[in-house]
Amino acid sequence: MVSRLGRRPVPARPRVEGDREQEILDAALAVLVDVGYDRLTMDAVATRAKASKATLYRKWDGKAPLVIDALMAQKTPPEVPADTGSLRGDLLAMFCGHGGLTDEHQTAILGSVVTAISRDPEFAAAFRERFIAPKVAVAREVYQRAHERGELRDDIDLDILTAALPGIVLHRSFLLGDPPTPDLITRVVDQVILPAATRG
């Protein structure tokens, strides 16, 4: 069909969706783990995905939303672990299983975006809202459950307590080179979290 100006209409560019979208997200995640967020470029992702950069820009207006979507696409929503009957059991179940602190893939991804959190406000805001907040909500629910069982002191600050275990473990991992093993997590739970938080 020819328009009144004598030009053929430009066909709409196809949307990036379905399997093709997932291929690009997988490529973005692979580049992220390889080089980190700071060195990740749309060109590098396009090359890894065997796509044009224009294809990426049809869906994402920059690397921050692309990386966030890639992170969210590869993770299952965190779930509150089954009630083990104790805070200790709940924490070990949550942090030592798939998607927890002992999950090497998850830790590698977190390590690749640490610098971006302090340097890229757009990425940091989206990362905290979409990736970190759901994890924090689950952890808080575990501590709230312990509080309802009567395990926690009445004056405990749940916001500080919720951040304590991952904060200690990730500090030791990223800064001291101490891998986040089940043994390390158990020691932090037994020697720091429980003595500080429970009635004793």
Image: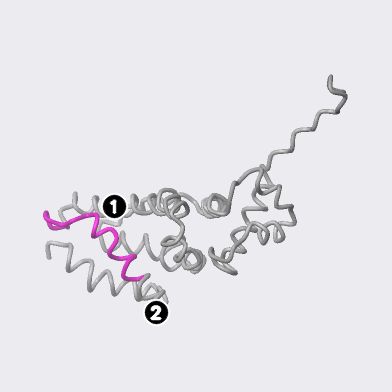
Kind of residue at disc 2: Asp
- In space, the residues marked 2 and 1 are separated at their CA atoms by 25 Å
Classify 10 Å Cα crowding around label 1: few (below 14), some (14-19), many (20 and above): some
The reply to whether dot 2 and dot 1 touch (C-beta < 8 Å) is no
* SS assignment at label 2: loop
The residue nearer to you, when weighing 90 against 52, is 52
Task: Give the answer, above or below, for where 174 lies relative to 99.
Answer: below
Secondary structure mainly formed by the magenta segment = helix
| Along the line of sight, the residue nearer the viewer: 57 or 195 | 57
Q: Position of residue 34 (x, y in %)?
A: 60, 69
Identified by mark 1, the residue type is Arg
The answer to whether residue 78 is left or right of residue 3 is: left
Badge 2 local density, few (<14 within 10 Å), some, or many (20+)? few
User: Which quarter of the rendering shows the C terminus?
Assistant: bottom left
The quarter holding residue 12 reads: top right
- As drawn, is 38 to the left or to the right of 168? right
Please name the residue that numbered disc 1 is placed on: 140
Above or below — where is 72 with respect to 193?
above
Given the current orientation, which residue lies at the most extreme front position?
5
Q: Residue at x 47, y 62 (%)?
A: 116
Residue 6, placed above or below residue 24: above
Count the marks: how many? 2
In percent of width and height, residue 168 lies at 31, 70
Q: Which mark is residue 178?
A: 2
Q: Which residues are magenta?
A: 152-169
Q: Is residue 168 magenta?
A: yes
Return the x and y of residue 133 as percentages of the image width and height: 37, 50
In terms of sequence position, does the residue under pointer 2 or pointer 1 come before the other? Answer: 1
